[in-house]
Image (cartoon, helix red, strand yellow):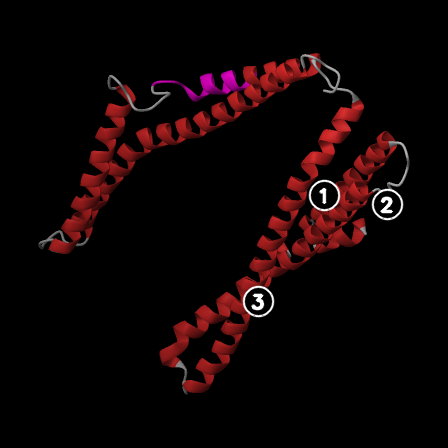
Amino acid sequence: MLGNPSGGYTTDLLIEHRREIADLLQRIKNRRLQVFGLYATPIFLIVTLLAWAGVKVFIWLHGDTPTAVNGIFAAVALILATASVIQGIAEFGVGSPWADSETPVRKLRLELALAEERHVLEARRHTPPVTDRQASYKEIIPWEIARLRKESRHYRRLHLLMQWLLFISSAAITGVTAWYDPPQPAKGVLIGLGATVTVITAAAGYFKPRERAFNLQQTADSIEQHTTALELGIAPYAAADEEENLRTYATTVEGLRAEQRMREQQLDQPQQGQQQVI
């Protein structure tokens, strides 16, 4: 917002709108958890009591229920009953510690919609020049690069974990089979290991964490390369006009991000669909 004397005020106002939106999102999340606990805890308590009675009727009808079983059911019922009372007091009591007690979630969602509308209207009233928006775009790219690399590391670690589990399970199947003859004592172990190998192989083929990690890392490296070239003023950003360099930079980075999204969509499609897209 260069050359705009009210630019600082406008920036602070937009930041305040974003803070209000973030606060409302967190309040909605907290309120949903509160409402869920308020209604779900009594239901779980009733289910526990019914299960306790069912165990007594269908299993130990003509005998005494074991002390351990009674103790477990009693402890669970006591915990649920205590939680129900505490949540009821927090919801309907005076001086509730819950910030939005007795507030419907739909009311908070309406406040969120209004806050987002105010943010959009304020942003439209004080839209900065294109050059300022391009310069601001350049400043947020480091966070985008960090996000891509973080996701790349996540998928790379997931791929390595899957591979190690696959290696260990495959080797264990051979070892257990060779150790037991006949394999009757280890039949459950073999079934579990075989199921693990099948699940990991299917998951690796469906989610493709290695390909996702490679694509994310490649996009992050390409964006970083263009960012460095822009900062150093080298090709393809060696033009004397800074606005032209920023425009070319924004166009190139958006193209790279669009390619990344397209690759993610192709990985989400079935194998036959991928072949048709390619």
At label 1, the amino acid type is Arg
Residue bearing the label numbered 3: 163
Nearer-the-camera pick, 235 or 125: 235
Q: Which numbered disc flags the more N-terminal residue, 3 or 2?
A: 3
Left/right of residue 131 with respect to residue 55 in the rendered view: right
| Coordinates of residue 66 in the picture (x, y in percent) | 12, 56
The answer to if 131 sits in the magenta stretch is no
Q: Nearer the viewer, residue 218 or 70?
A: 218
Task: Give the percent coordinates (x, y) of residue 74.
Answer: 16, 45
Residue 234 image label? 2
Q: CA distance from mark 3 to mark 1?
A: 26 Å
Q: Is residue 49 visible?
A: no
Q: Which span is picked out in magenta? A: 102-113
Is 274 situated left or right of 153 in this image?
right
Residue 250, percent from left and from top:
79, 35
Q: Main secondary structure of the magenta part?
A: helix
Helix, strand or loop at disc 1? helix
